[in-house]
Structure formats: C-alpha cells, structure tokens
Image: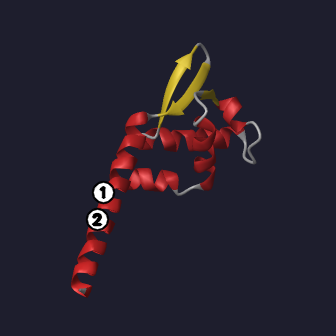
Amino acid sequence: MTYQVAAALADPMRQEILEKLREGPRAVGEIAAGMTISRPAVSQHLKVLKESGLVAETRRGTRHYFAIAPEGIGELRAYLDGLWSDALAAFARHVEKAR
C-alpha cells in the first residue's frame, strides 16, 4: 500500500465519503448531502481519493460521478492480506519458540 492510500484513508471525512460510495456511484451533490462539510470541501476530499486510486470519476454531461475504484481497493486488500500473513507467521514462530 502506498503512503498516498494510507494518507487518504486517515481522514474521517474521506472514510465517510467511501461509505457513501459503497452503495454505488454518486454525484458530488449526492455525496455532500447530509455531511457536515461544504460541497467544495467534499470535492477536495474526492480529489485526494481519486489521486490515491481509491475512487474513479466519470462524467455524464455536466455532472461528475464518483465510484469506488476496484483496483485501488484491491491494492489495499493485498496490503492488508500481506500484513495478516506476516502476523500469522510471526505468531507461529512465537508458538514454536515457546515449546
């Protein structure tokens, strides 16, 4: 996982945006609805998420739609799977030493 992905996920507002996108693609106004930040602030967070590869943007006319990018989430999952494997291996080594 790149530093950029980790930094993008560190912000609670970006986490909230990703939660909204779990339901499917949304326009900026739809994402901003009900949030405690302004629409321009949502756009800035979307820019960070897009640059990190976690979100993809498509345009339909004058509207911009955002969706979770499977490739970015795949990279994150691969990183977490690797951490899990390393943790299990370390635990196994610990158990073997304790015997």
Using the image, determine if residue 88 lies above or below residue 4.
below
Instruction: Answer whether labels 1 and 2 touch (C-beta < 8 Å).
Output: yes
Q: Identify which amino acid the numbered label 2 is placed on.
A: Asp
Q: Nearer the viewer, residue 48 or 97?
A: 97
x, y percent for residue 4 = 41, 51
Task: Kindly tell me whether residue 1 is visible in this rendering.
Answer: no
Using the image, determine if residue 45 lies above or below residue 79.
above
Q: Which residue is mark 2?
A: 86
* Residue 65 numbered mark, or none: none
**Is residue 63 found left or right of 82 in the rendered image?**
right
**Is residue 40 found left or right of 65 in the rendered image?**
right
**Is residue 16 found left or right of 93 in the rendered image?**
right
Quadrant of the image occupied by residue 52? top left
Q: Residues within 10 Å of mark 1 (few under 14, many from 20)?
A: few
Residue drawn at point x = 70 percent, y = 37 percent: 32
Q: Nearer the viewer, residue 14 or 42?
A: 14
| Label 2 SS | helix
Using the image, determine if residue 76 lies above or below residue 53.
below
- In the orientation shown, which residue stands out farthest toward the top? 61
Q: Which residue is mark 1?
A: 82
x, y percent for residue 77 = 39, 48
